[in-house]
Amino acid sequence: MLLLRGAAEVVTPPVTSKPLSGKAMGEVERHPNTDILIENDKIVAVGRDLESLASKVIDVSGKVIVPGFVDPHTHLVWSGSREHELEWKLKGRTYQEILADGGGILRTVKETRNSDFSDLKAESLLRFNNAIKHGSTTIEIKSGYGLERDTEIKQLKVANWLGSLGLAETVVTFMGAHALPEGSERFSYINQIIEMLPDVREFSDFCDVFCEEGAFTDNEARKILEAAKEHDFSLKIHADEFGDTGGGKLAAELGVVSADHLAGSTLETIKELQKAGVIGVLLPGTPFAILSDKFSPARKMIANNLPIALATDCNPNCYTESMQFIQQLAVFRMKMTPAEALVASTINAALAIEKTDRGCIAEGWRADLLICDIPDYRHLTYHFGVNHVETVIIGGKVIDA
Ligand code: NIG
Ligand code: FE
């Protein structure tokens, strides 16, 4: 048993099995002078002056405790880097122009295909540890830098290996439909992806498609995702990153678990997603990284009761592992409140990857907790650009990442 004694405040979304939306996204519970008792990987009590015979006690006086952050959208298993593209972006080249010239995703595909399994593990582990240090306790990871069977499987195996280390848990997504590989013909590559599905199923739970101009059309995405459904994958879509180009509407039509990006979605699409029960995963690091002001219309989404989650999108174009930085962008650039940003990074993010046991601090919930060296939870976003997480507890264990 582990006792966290005397937190200045324990802050949590209200306990729920459904994602929070609308006004409820902005209402967190704040419990002052509170203890948390943990047994094995679960929280067994939350309250004042808990009596306990815990073998280990951590004095958390003056600290804030929040649920561990869930990062429901990353591409963090890759090789190489793309710092030169930042200079191209500064000169005005767009993300899609860079991709069409064989840069962007296609550049990372070359480097990931050429890296051996142990190098890919080592590079990815550095980022994984960075994510944990900044408070991520469950991390979704996608493939999509192989675009052929063996490299896709190599990436998926690394993502599973990271999850087996007893650090953060991983949820793994197959994304063979990330870009059209150089030299491939569209129709035949789409069929290859569909043929890979049974082989990658043992390594991944979700299937995702980049549905956008320059990537895959809505009809192509529908074909791939319908096939994935037959193999019992849960579904996600990279949708409406640059404009309302059909991905958001397809997400609503298929009733996917989450539609991610949604920077270009219209009000009509937002309403369709809401009706279909889809969670919007917003990735404000991405417009930031492409020097764009086009952030997802979070306020419009909240006003229309679409539940939203936040994620880093950690990838060589948008290179951050920090969910704290993402919450800060959400507040400063999308005008979400600190409470909404916290809900979007905990319970709603957990439900966006179908995890129902984490994201709240209450009896019976998984003991994924962050001890933060701040006087009030709002400092997580108000005081930006520094790491507020002092101690990370995952599944009841203090983690040294
Ligand atoms: O979510 N948009 C597509 N995929 C990633 C970017 C991957 C990359 O640029 O390497 C994203 O932004
Ligand atoms: Fe992405």
Image (tube, helix red, strand yellow):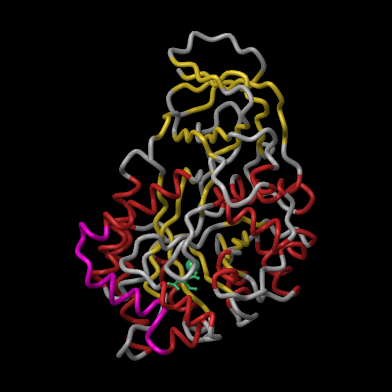
Does 153 sit left or right of 208 as displayed? left
State how many labels appear.
Answer: 0
Answer with the quarter of the image where residue 303 lies: bottom right
Asked if residue 202 can be seen in this view, the reply is no
Residue at left 62%, top 73%? 248
Q: Position of residue 277 (x, y in %)?
A: 65, 59
Q: Is residue 119 magenta?
A: yes
Using residue 177 as the reference point, say whether residue 258 is left or right of it: right
| Residue 173 picture quarter | bottom left
What percent of the width, then of the height, locates residue 9? 67, 28
Using the image, determine if residue 372 lies above or below residue 311: above
Q: Quadrant of the C terminus?
A: top left
Which quarter shows the N terminus? Answer: top left
Is residue 285 a member of the stretch shown in magenta? no
Q: Is residue 327 above or below residue 392?
A: below
Which residue is located at x 31 percent, y 57 percent? 203
- Residue 295 at x, y = what percent? 66, 69
Nearer to the camera, 346 or 111:
111
- Residue at 63%, 32% (x, y): give it: 64
Left or right: where does residue 217 sit relative to residue 63? left
Range of residues picked out in magenta: 101-120
Q: Nearer the viewer, residue 300 or 118?
A: 118
Q: Position of residue 357 (x, y in %)?
A: 53, 38
Q: Is residue 370 visible?
A: yes
In the picture, measured across the screen, residue 358 lies left or right of residue 115, that is: right
Q: Main secondary structure of the magenta part?
A: helix
